[in-house]
Image (tube, grey):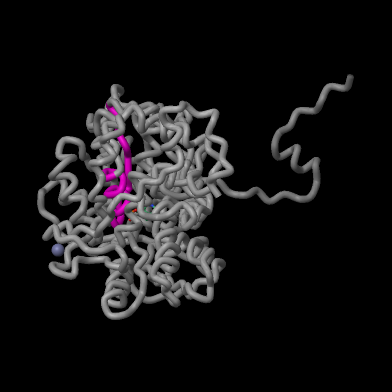
Protein backbone atom coordinates (compact mmCIF):
# COMPACT_ATOMS: atom_id res chain seq x y z
CA UNK A 1 0.00 0.00 0.00
CA UNK A 2 2.65 2.49 1.02
CA UNK A 3 5.48 1.64 -1.39
CA UNK A 4 3.69 3.24 -4.32
CA UNK A 5 3.90 6.65 -2.73
CA UNK A 6 6.52 8.93 -4.17
CA UNK A 7 8.18 10.81 -1.35
CA UNK A 8 10.80 12.59 -3.44
CA UNK A 9 9.02 15.91 -3.51
CA UNK A 10 9.25 16.16 0.29
CA UNK A 11 12.18 17.61 2.26
CA UNK A 12 14.83 15.04 2.98
CA UNK A 13 14.90 15.60 6.76
CA UNK A 14 11.34 14.44 7.28
CA UNK A 15 10.87 12.04 4.39
CA UNK A 16 11.28 8.89 6.44
CA UNK A 17 8.81 10.15 9.06
CA UNK A 18 5.95 11.09 6.75
CA UNK A 19 4.46 7.62 6.79
CA UNK A 20 4.36 6.87 10.52
CA UNK A 21 5.92 3.62 11.68
CA UNK A 22 6.04 4.50 15.38
CA UNK A 23 3.75 2.16 17.33
CA UNK A 24 4.52 3.30 20.88
CA UNK A 25 3.73 1.22 23.94
CA UNK A 26 0.16 2.02 24.79
CA UNK A 27 -1.48 0.68 27.95
CA UNK A 28 -4.62 1.44 29.90
CA UNK A 29 -3.69 3.55 32.89
CA UNK A 30 -6.02 4.03 35.86
CA UNK A 31 -6.50 7.71 36.75
CA UNK A 32 -7.14 6.66 40.36
CA UNK A 33 -4.57 4.09 41.49
CA UNK A 34 -2.17 4.44 38.54
CA UNK A 35 -2.10 0.71 37.72
CA UNK A 36 -1.54 -0.22 34.09
CA UNK A 37 -3.31 -2.86 32.03
CA UNK A 38 -2.68 -4.49 28.67
CA UNK A 39 -4.73 -2.96 25.84
CA UNK A 40 -5.40 -6.32 24.26
CA UNK A 41 -8.74 -6.45 26.06
CA UNK A 42 -11.78 -4.20 26.20
CA UNK A 43 -11.64 -2.37 29.54
CA UNK A 44 -13.62 0.65 30.69
CA UNK A 45 -12.88 0.97 34.38
CA UNK A 46 -9.96 -0.07 36.53
CA UNK A 47 -10.38 -3.72 37.60
CA UNK A 48 -8.62 -2.83 40.88
CA UNK A 49 -10.27 0.42 42.05
CA UNK A 50 -13.07 1.05 39.49
CA UNK A 51 -11.78 4.50 38.52
CA UNK A 52 -11.74 5.69 34.92
CA UNK A 53 -8.97 4.62 32.57
CA UNK A 54 -6.94 6.63 30.13
CA UNK A 55 -4.62 5.38 27.43
CA UNK A 56 -0.99 6.07 28.11
CA UNK A 57 1.84 5.68 25.64
CA UNK A 58 4.77 4.66 27.82
CA UNK A 59 7.17 5.63 25.04
CA UNK A 60 5.68 9.09 24.56
CA UNK A 61 8.83 10.80 25.81
CA UNK A 62 10.84 9.18 23.02
CA UNK A 63 8.85 11.37 20.60
CA UNK A 64 10.68 14.33 22.16
CA UNK A 65 13.81 13.33 20.27
CA UNK A 66 12.14 15.09 17.34
CA UNK A 67 11.93 18.86 17.79
CA UNK A 68 8.53 20.53 17.99
CA UNK A 69 9.28 22.50 14.84
CA UNK A 70 10.05 19.27 12.99
CA UNK A 71 6.79 17.71 14.17
CA UNK A 72 4.99 20.72 12.71
CA UNK A 73 6.66 20.03 9.37
CA UNK A 74 5.89 16.35 9.52
CA UNK A 75 2.18 16.99 10.12
CA UNK A 76 2.02 19.76 7.56
CA UNK A 77 3.72 17.82 4.77
CA UNK A 78 1.80 14.69 5.72
CA UNK A 79 -1.36 16.50 4.73
CA UNK A 80 -0.06 16.46 1.16
CA UNK A 81 0.26 12.67 1.09
CA UNK A 82 -2.50 10.96 -0.77
CA UNK A 83 -2.80 8.19 1.75
CA UNK A 84 -6.39 7.65 2.82
CA UNK A 85 -5.64 6.25 6.27
CA UNK A 86 -3.78 9.46 7.15
CA UNK A 87 -6.41 11.83 5.78
CA UNK A 88 -8.55 11.99 8.92
CA UNK A 89 -7.69 11.92 12.59
CA UNK A 90 -4.73 9.55 12.06
CA UNK A 91 -2.79 12.38 10.45
CA UNK A 92 -1.55 12.80 14.01
CA UNK A 93 -1.10 9.07 14.58
CA UNK A 94 1.99 9.24 16.80
CA UNK A 95 0.12 11.29 19.43
CA UNK A 96 -3.34 10.00 18.71
CA UNK A 97 -3.18 6.20 18.83
CA UNK A 98 0.09 4.84 17.47
CA UNK A 99 -0.70 1.16 18.08
CA UNK A 100 -3.06 0.71 15.17
CA UNK A 101 -1.42 -0.30 11.87
CA UNK A 102 -2.37 1.96 8.97
CA UNK A 103 -4.05 -0.91 7.14
CA UNK A 104 -6.52 -1.34 10.02
CA UNK A 105 -7.56 2.31 10.13
CA UNK A 106 -11.22 2.82 9.27
CA UNK A 107 -11.56 6.18 7.54
CA UNK A 108 -15.04 7.39 6.59
CA UNK A 109 -14.13 11.02 5.99
CA UNK A 110 -14.04 12.27 9.57
CA UNK A 111 -11.90 15.08 10.89
CA UNK A 112 -10.21 17.92 9.01
CA UNK A 113 -13.26 20.11 9.61
CA UNK A 114 -13.09 23.77 8.62
CA UNK A 115 -12.63 26.81 10.81
CA UNK A 116 -15.09 29.41 9.56
CA UNK A 117 -14.85 33.09 10.46
CA UNK A 118 -18.07 34.20 12.12
CA UNK A 119 -20.22 36.57 10.10
CA UNK A 120 -19.21 40.18 10.98
CA UNK A 121 -22.75 41.06 12.06
CA UNK A 122 -22.85 38.03 14.32
CA UNK A 123 -19.49 39.07 15.79
CA UNK A 124 -20.97 42.47 16.59
CA UNK A 125 -23.95 40.84 18.30
CA UNK A 126 -21.71 38.54 20.34
CA UNK A 127 -19.35 41.42 21.08
CA UNK A 128 -16.11 39.87 19.88
CA UNK A 129 -14.30 38.47 16.82
CA UNK A 130 -14.50 34.71 16.68
CA UNK A 131 -14.48 31.67 14.42
CA UNK A 132 -16.42 28.44 14.44
CA UNK A 133 -14.79 25.06 13.99
CA UNK A 134 -17.58 23.21 12.34
CA UNK A 135 -17.62 19.63 13.53
CA UNK A 136 -21.11 19.18 12.15
CA UNK A 137 -19.35 18.50 8.85
CA UNK A 138 -18.28 15.02 9.92
CA UNK A 139 -19.83 11.96 8.23
CA UNK A 140 -22.61 11.41 10.78
CA UNK A 141 -22.75 15.18 11.33
CA UNK A 142 -21.17 15.43 14.77
CA UNK A 143 -17.76 15.40 16.43
CA UNK A 144 -18.54 11.93 17.82
CA UNK A 145 -17.18 10.52 14.55
CA UNK A 146 -13.66 11.43 15.66
CA UNK A 147 -13.80 9.13 18.67
CA UNK A 148 -15.74 6.50 16.80
CA UNK A 149 -13.09 6.38 14.05
CA UNK A 150 -10.44 5.52 16.63
CA UNK A 151 -12.71 3.09 18.52
CA UNK A 152 -13.83 1.25 15.40
CA UNK A 153 -10.29 1.18 13.97
CA UNK A 154 -9.25 -0.36 17.26
CA UNK A 155 -12.05 -2.95 17.05
CA UNK A 156 -11.04 -3.70 13.46
CA UNK A 157 -7.47 -4.19 14.60
CA UNK A 158 -8.56 -6.31 17.58
CA UNK A 159 -10.68 -8.58 15.37
CA UNK A 160 -7.62 -9.34 13.27
CA UNK A 161 -5.02 -9.49 15.97
CA UNK A 162 -7.05 -11.35 18.59
CA UNK A 163 -8.97 -13.30 15.97
CA UNK A 164 -12.30 -12.32 17.53
CA UNK A 165 -15.29 -14.14 16.06
CA UNK A 166 -17.97 -12.00 17.65
CA UNK A 167 -18.08 -8.37 18.73
CA UNK A 168 -21.16 -6.60 19.98
CA UNK A 169 -20.68 -2.84 20.03
CA UNK A 170 -23.08 -1.04 22.33
CA UNK A 171 -23.60 2.52 23.55
CA UNK A 172 -25.99 4.73 25.45
CA UNK A 173 -26.60 8.01 23.74
CA UNK A 174 -28.15 11.44 23.71
CA UNK A 175 -28.39 10.81 19.95
CA UNK A 176 -25.09 11.54 18.28
CA UNK A 177 -22.96 8.80 19.82
CA UNK A 178 -25.42 6.21 18.59
CA UNK A 179 -25.52 7.75 15.11
CA UNK A 180 -21.73 7.63 14.93
CA UNK A 181 -21.39 4.16 16.50
CA UNK A 182 -24.02 2.65 14.21
CA UNK A 183 -22.43 4.23 11.14
CA UNK A 184 -18.90 3.08 11.84
CA UNK A 185 -19.90 -0.40 13.08
CA UNK A 186 -21.98 -0.95 9.96
CA UNK A 187 -18.80 -0.54 7.91
CA UNK A 188 -17.25 -3.65 9.51
CA UNK A 189 -17.88 -7.33 8.72
CA UNK A 190 -21.50 -8.05 9.66
CA UNK A 191 -20.76 -11.72 10.27
CA UNK A 192 -18.62 -10.67 13.22
CA UNK A 193 -19.86 -7.29 14.34
CA UNK A 194 -23.26 -6.48 15.82
CA UNK A 195 -24.40 -2.99 16.64
CA UNK A 196 -26.79 -1.99 19.43
CA UNK A 197 -27.73 1.46 20.68
CA UNK A 198 -29.69 2.39 23.79
CA UNK A 199 -31.66 5.63 23.67
CA UNK A 200 -33.82 7.47 26.19
CA UNK A 201 -37.27 7.32 24.61
CA UNK A 202 -38.41 10.67 23.26
CA UNK A 203 -35.15 12.39 24.27
CA UNK A 204 -33.36 12.30 20.94
CA UNK A 205 -34.42 14.18 17.83
CA UNK A 206 -36.19 12.36 14.94
CA UNK A 207 -33.10 12.82 12.78
CA UNK A 208 -30.84 11.31 15.43
CA UNK A 209 -33.22 8.35 15.78
CA UNK A 210 -33.28 7.81 12.03
CA UNK A 211 -29.49 7.61 11.81
CA UNK A 212 -28.82 4.34 13.70
CA UNK A 213 -32.01 2.88 12.21
CA UNK A 214 -30.69 3.67 8.74
CA UNK A 215 -27.32 2.14 9.58
CA UNK A 216 -29.06 -1.11 10.50
CA UNK A 217 -28.32 -1.08 14.21
CA UNK A 218 -30.59 -2.64 16.82
CA UNK A 219 -32.15 0.43 18.42
CA UNK A 220 -33.49 -0.02 21.94
CA UNK A 221 -35.54 2.78 23.46
CA UNK A 222 -36.00 2.80 27.21
CA UNK A 223 -37.79 5.21 29.56
CA UNK A 224 -35.73 7.85 31.36
CA UNK A 225 -32.89 10.17 30.40
CA UNK A 226 -29.35 9.58 29.20
CA UNK A 227 -28.00 8.99 32.71
CA UNK A 228 -30.42 6.03 33.06
CA UNK A 229 -29.29 4.53 29.74
CA UNK A 230 -25.68 4.97 30.74
CA UNK A 231 -26.25 2.95 33.92
CA UNK A 232 -27.77 0.14 31.88
CA UNK A 233 -24.90 -0.13 29.41
CA UNK A 234 -22.44 0.06 32.30
CA UNK A 235 -24.18 -2.93 33.89
CA UNK A 236 -24.16 -4.77 30.57
CA UNK A 237 -20.47 -4.01 30.03
CA UNK A 238 -19.70 -5.31 33.50
CA UNK A 239 -21.52 -8.63 33.18
CA UNK A 240 -21.49 -9.50 29.50
CA UNK A 241 -19.06 -9.62 26.61
CA UNK A 242 -19.81 -6.35 24.89
CA UNK A 243 -17.68 -3.52 23.62
CA UNK A 244 -18.83 -0.28 25.24
CA UNK A 245 -18.61 2.62 22.80
CA UNK A 246 -19.36 5.50 25.13
CA UNK A 247 -16.63 8.00 25.89
CA UNK A 248 -16.03 6.07 29.09
CA UNK A 249 -14.07 3.88 26.68
CA UNK A 250 -10.73 5.71 26.59
CA UNK A 251 -10.20 4.73 22.96
CA UNK A 252 -12.96 7.21 22.09
CA UNK A 253 -11.13 10.01 23.89
CA UNK A 254 -8.00 9.15 21.89
CA UNK A 255 -9.73 9.99 18.60
CA UNK A 256 -11.42 13.09 19.93
CA UNK A 257 -8.04 14.63 20.78
CA UNK A 258 -7.68 15.24 17.04
CA UNK A 259 -9.94 18.29 17.43
CA UNK A 260 -7.15 20.01 19.38
CA UNK A 261 -4.38 18.89 17.01
CA UNK A 262 -6.30 20.21 14.02
CA UNK A 263 -6.87 23.60 15.61
CA UNK A 264 -3.14 23.91 16.31
CA UNK A 265 -2.31 23.05 12.73
CA UNK A 266 -5.01 25.32 11.30
CA UNK A 267 -3.60 28.22 13.35
CA UNK A 268 -0.03 27.50 12.25
CA UNK A 269 0.72 26.35 15.81
CA UNK A 270 0.27 29.83 17.21
CA UNK A 271 -2.06 29.46 20.19
CA UNK A 272 -1.24 32.73 21.85
CA UNK A 273 -4.30 34.09 23.71
CA UNK A 274 -6.47 31.37 22.25
CA UNK A 275 -9.83 30.56 23.82
CA UNK A 276 -11.71 27.38 22.90
CA UNK A 277 -15.41 27.41 23.70
CA UNK A 278 -16.84 23.93 24.36
CA UNK A 279 -20.34 22.77 25.30
CA UNK A 280 -20.10 20.15 28.05
CA UNK A 281 -22.38 17.14 28.48
CA UNK A 282 -20.76 13.85 29.44
CA UNK A 283 -17.45 15.79 29.42
CA UNK A 284 -15.65 13.44 27.03
CA UNK A 285 -15.14 16.16 24.45
CA UNK A 286 -13.70 18.75 26.83
CA UNK A 287 -11.45 16.04 28.33
CA UNK A 288 -10.15 15.06 24.91
CA UNK A 289 -9.55 18.65 23.87
CA UNK A 290 -7.57 19.40 27.03
CA UNK A 291 -5.55 16.18 26.64
CA UNK A 292 -4.88 16.93 22.99
CA UNK A 293 -3.44 20.35 23.71
CA UNK A 294 -1.35 18.84 26.51
CA UNK A 295 0.19 16.35 24.07
CA UNK A 296 1.11 19.19 21.72
CA UNK A 297 2.56 21.16 24.57
CA UNK A 298 4.63 18.24 25.88
CA UNK A 299 6.24 17.74 22.49
CA UNK A 300 6.84 21.49 22.24
CA UNK A 301 4.76 21.64 19.09
CA UNK A 302 2.97 24.57 20.72
CA UNK A 303 4.53 26.83 23.35
CA UNK A 304 1.37 27.35 25.43
CA UNK A 305 -1.98 25.91 26.39
CA UNK A 306 -5.20 27.63 25.30
CA UNK A 307 -7.92 28.78 27.65
CA UNK A 308 -10.93 26.51 27.78
CA UNK A 309 -14.40 28.00 28.25
CA UNK A 310 -16.83 25.25 29.28
CA UNK A 311 -20.49 26.05 28.65
CA UNK A 312 -23.58 24.37 30.13
CA UNK A 313 -27.30 24.98 30.30
CA UNK A 314 -28.50 25.79 33.80
CA UNK A 315 -30.86 22.82 33.32
CA UNK A 316 -27.84 20.47 33.31
CA UNK A 317 -24.84 22.23 34.83
CA UNK A 318 -22.97 19.93 37.26
CA UNK A 319 -19.55 20.87 35.83
CA UNK A 320 -20.28 24.60 36.01
CA UNK A 321 -21.47 24.21 39.61
CA UNK A 322 -18.35 22.28 40.54
CA UNK A 323 -16.11 24.89 38.95
CA UNK A 324 -17.87 27.74 40.75
CA UNK A 325 -18.18 26.13 44.18
CA UNK A 326 -15.51 23.42 44.30
CA UNK A 327 -18.24 20.89 45.15
CA UNK A 328 -19.32 18.27 42.67
CA UNK A 329 -22.91 17.12 43.00
CA UNK A 330 -24.63 14.98 40.36
CA UNK A 331 -27.97 16.53 39.52
CA UNK A 332 -31.32 15.60 38.07
CA UNK A 333 -31.49 17.32 34.68
CA UNK A 334 -34.40 19.36 33.39
CA UNK A 335 -35.32 19.37 29.67
CA UNK A 336 -32.83 21.29 27.56
CA UNK A 337 -32.62 22.27 23.91
CA UNK A 338 -28.92 21.44 24.23
CA UNK A 339 -30.23 17.91 24.49
CA UNK A 340 -26.95 16.26 23.45
CA UNK A 341 -25.40 17.78 26.56
CA UNK A 342 -28.33 17.15 28.92
CA UNK A 343 -26.40 15.06 31.43
CA UNK A 344 -26.57 15.32 35.21
CA UNK A 345 -23.65 13.08 36.16
CA UNK A 346 -20.98 13.31 33.45
CA UNK A 347 -18.99 10.10 33.20
CA UNK A 348 -15.72 11.88 32.42
CA UNK A 349 -16.02 14.39 35.24
CA UNK A 350 -13.14 12.81 37.26
CA UNK A 351 -10.89 13.31 34.23
CA UNK A 352 -11.92 16.95 33.89
CA UNK A 353 -11.24 17.53 37.56
CA UNK A 354 -7.81 15.94 37.35
CA UNK A 355 -6.86 17.82 34.17
CA UNK A 356 -7.99 21.13 35.59
CA UNK A 357 -6.24 20.58 38.91
CA UNK A 358 -3.00 19.39 37.37
CA UNK A 359 -2.68 21.45 34.20
CA UNK A 360 -5.52 23.83 33.45
CA UNK A 361 -6.00 25.51 36.81
CA UNK A 362 -5.45 28.96 35.28
CA UNK A 363 -6.76 27.96 31.88
CA UNK A 364 -10.29 26.77 32.66
CA UNK A 365 -13.37 28.97 32.72
CA UNK A 366 -17.07 28.17 32.82
CA UNK A 367 -20.45 29.82 32.29
CA UNK A 368 -24.00 28.53 32.34
CA UNK A 369 -27.00 29.76 30.40
CA UNK A 370 -30.77 30.02 30.27
CA UNK A 371 -32.43 27.84 27.69
CA UNK A 372 -33.64 30.88 25.80
CA UNK A 373 -30.05 32.12 25.33
CA UNK A 374 -29.02 28.78 23.89
CA UNK A 375 -31.89 28.68 21.44
CA UNK A 376 -31.36 32.23 20.30
CA UNK A 377 -27.62 31.64 20.03
CA UNK A 378 -28.37 28.99 17.45
CA UNK A 379 -31.04 30.98 15.57
CA UNK A 380 -28.90 34.12 15.46
CA UNK A 381 -25.90 32.20 14.11
CA UNK A 382 -27.86 30.31 11.50
CA UNK A 383 -29.58 33.37 10.07
CA UNK A 384 -26.08 34.78 9.63
CA UNK A 385 -24.72 32.05 7.39
CA UNK A 386 -23.78 29.36 9.89
CA UNK A 387 -25.06 25.82 10.35
CA UNK A 388 -24.75 25.28 14.08
CA UNK A 389 -26.77 22.93 16.29
CA UNK A 390 -28.27 23.87 19.65
CA UNK A 391 -24.95 22.95 21.34
CA UNK A 392 -23.12 25.20 18.87
CA UNK A 393 -25.67 27.88 19.77
CA UNK A 394 -24.91 27.17 23.39
CA UNK A 395 -21.20 27.78 22.74
CA UNK A 396 -21.90 31.06 20.97
CA UNK A 397 -24.30 32.26 23.66
CA UNK A 398 -21.75 31.16 26.25
CA UNK A 399 -19.09 33.23 24.54
CA UNK A 400 -21.41 36.24 24.52
CA UNK A 401 -22.00 35.86 28.24
CA UNK A 402 -18.28 35.43 28.95
CA UNK A 403 -17.54 38.60 26.96
CA UNK A 404 -20.19 40.54 28.87
CA UNK A 405 -18.66 39.32 32.14
CA UNK A 406 -15.17 40.36 31.04
CA UNK A 407 -13.82 36.79 31.05
CA UNK A 408 -13.01 36.97 27.35
CA UNK A 409 -11.88 40.17 25.67
CA UNK A 410 -10.60 41.70 22.44
CA UNK A 411 -7.06 40.42 23.02
CA UNK A 412 -8.26 36.85 22.77
CA UNK A 413 -8.50 34.76 19.66
CA UNK A 414 -11.64 32.67 19.96
CA UNK A 415 -12.70 29.38 18.42
CA UNK A 416 -16.15 28.07 19.13
CA UNK A 417 -16.85 24.34 18.92
CA UNK A 418 -19.97 23.69 16.89
CA UNK A 419 -20.34 20.06 17.81
CA UNK A 420 -22.96 18.96 15.30
CA UNK A 421 -25.00 20.07 12.32
CA UNK A 422 -28.00 22.38 12.42
CA UNK A 423 -30.21 19.77 10.72
CA UNK A 424 -29.95 17.31 13.59
CA UNK A 425 -31.82 19.68 15.87
CA UNK A 426 -34.32 21.28 13.51
CA UNK A 427 -37.18 20.07 15.73
CA UNK A 428 -36.18 22.69 18.30
CA UNK A 429 -36.15 25.32 15.59
CA UNK A 430 -39.67 24.14 14.69
CA UNK A 431 -40.87 24.43 18.27
CA UNK A 432 -39.43 27.92 18.44
CA UNK A 433 -40.99 29.09 15.19
CA UNK A 434 -44.36 27.71 16.27
CA UNK A 435 -43.90 29.08 19.79
CA UNK A 436 -44.75 25.64 21.10
CA UNK A 437 -42.09 24.90 23.67
CA UNK A 438 -43.36 22.83 26.58
CA UNK A 439 -43.29 24.87 29.76
CA UNK A 440 -40.26 23.11 31.28
CA UNK A 441 -37.96 24.67 28.68
CA UNK A 442 -38.91 28.18 29.79
CA UNK A 443 -38.68 29.50 26.25
CA UNK A 444 -41.08 32.07 24.82
CA UNK A 445 -40.44 32.78 21.16
CA UNK A 446 -39.51 36.25 20.03
CA UNK A 447 -41.13 37.49 16.86
CA UNK A 448 -37.88 38.71 15.30
CA UNK A 449 -36.50 35.16 15.07
CA UNK A 450 -39.62 33.45 13.80
CA UNK A 451 -39.74 32.29 10.19
CA UNK A 452 -42.50 30.31 8.52
CA UNK A 453 -43.42 29.22 5.01
CA UNK A 454 -45.82 31.46 3.10
CA UNK A 455 -48.70 29.76 1.31
CA UNK A 456 -49.65 31.30 -2.03
CA UNK A 457 -51.38 30.10 -5.19
CA UNK A 458 -49.34 28.73 -8.11
CA UNK A 459 -49.41 32.12 -9.77
CA UNK A 460 -46.42 34.30 -10.65
CA UNK A 461 -48.64 37.34 -10.33
CA UNK A 462 -49.64 36.43 -6.79
CA UNK A 463 -46.00 35.75 -5.86
CA UNK A 464 -44.83 39.01 -7.41
CA UNK A 465 -47.53 40.94 -5.55
CA UNK A 466 -46.62 39.28 -2.29
CA UNK A 467 -42.94 40.13 -2.78
CA UNK A 468 -43.73 43.62 -3.99
CA UNK A 469 -41.59 43.07 -7.08
CA UNK A 470 -40.91 45.95 -9.42
CA UNK A 471 -41.69 45.48 -13.11
CA UNK A 472 -38.67 45.42 -15.49
CA UNK A 473 -38.42 48.50 -17.72
CA UNK A 474 -39.12 47.55 -21.31
CA UNK A 475 -36.00 47.98 -23.48
C1 LIG B 1 -22.15 14.53 22.66
C2 LIG B 1 -22.41 15.90 22.28
C3 LIG B 1 -22.07 16.97 23.11
C4 LIG B 1 -21.49 16.80 24.48
O1 LIG B 1 -20.20 16.25 24.43
P1 LIG B 1 -19.65 15.47 25.71
O2 LIG B 1 -18.41 14.81 25.23
O3 LIG B 1 -20.71 14.50 26.08
O4 LIG B 1 -19.42 16.50 26.75
C5 LIG B 1 -22.27 18.25 22.65
N1 LIG B 1 -22.82 18.47 21.45
C6 LIG B 1 -23.18 17.47 20.64
C7 LIG B 1 -23.79 17.79 19.34
C8 LIG B 1 -22.98 16.15 21.02
O5 LIG B 1 -23.37 15.16 20.22
ZN1 LIG C 1 -7.32 1.89 39.70
Q: Is residue 277 magenta?
A: yes
Residue 140 in the image: x percent, y percent? 50, 55
- Displayed-image quarter of ligand 1: bottom left
Which picture quadrant has residue 17? top left
Whether residue 393 appears in this view of the structure is no
Which picture quadrant has residue 159? bottom left
In the rendered image, the residue lying farthest to the bottom is 239
In-front residue for pair 308/52: 52
How many numbered discs sit on the rendered protein? 0
| Point 32% across, 35% down: residue | 400
Which picture quadrant has residue 12? top left
| Point 45% across, 77% down: residue | 165
Whether residue 326 appears in this view of the structure is yes
Residue 360 in the image: x percent, y percent? 18, 40
Residue 469 in the image: x percent, y percent? 74, 32
In-front residue for pair 91/306: 91
Q: Compared with residue 59, is residue 156 higher up or lower down, i.e. above or below?
A: below
Q: Which residues are magenta?
A: 273-291
Q: Compared with residue 109, is residue 182 higher up or lower down, i.e. above or below?
A: below
Residue 155 in the image: x percent, y percent? 41, 64
Q: Quadrant of the C terminus?
A: top right
Q: Is residue 300 magenta?
A: no
| Point 21% across, 55% down: residue | 349
In the rendered image, the residue lying farthest to the top is 475
| Point 55% across, 46% down: residue | 451
Amino acid sequence: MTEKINLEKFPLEIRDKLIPDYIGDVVYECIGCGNEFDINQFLYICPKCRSLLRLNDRNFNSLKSIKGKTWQEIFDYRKMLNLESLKGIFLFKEMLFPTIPLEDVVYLGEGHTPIVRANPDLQRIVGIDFSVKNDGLNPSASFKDRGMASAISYINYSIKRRDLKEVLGICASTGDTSAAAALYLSYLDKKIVKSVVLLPKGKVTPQQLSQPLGSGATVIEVPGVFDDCMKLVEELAEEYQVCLLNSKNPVRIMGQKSYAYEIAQQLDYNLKDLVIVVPVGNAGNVTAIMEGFLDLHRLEIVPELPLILAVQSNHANPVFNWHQTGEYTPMKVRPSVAQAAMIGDPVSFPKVKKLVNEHYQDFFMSVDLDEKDIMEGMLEANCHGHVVCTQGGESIAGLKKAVSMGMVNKNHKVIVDSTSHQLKFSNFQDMYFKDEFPEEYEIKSEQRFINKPVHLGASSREIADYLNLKKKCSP
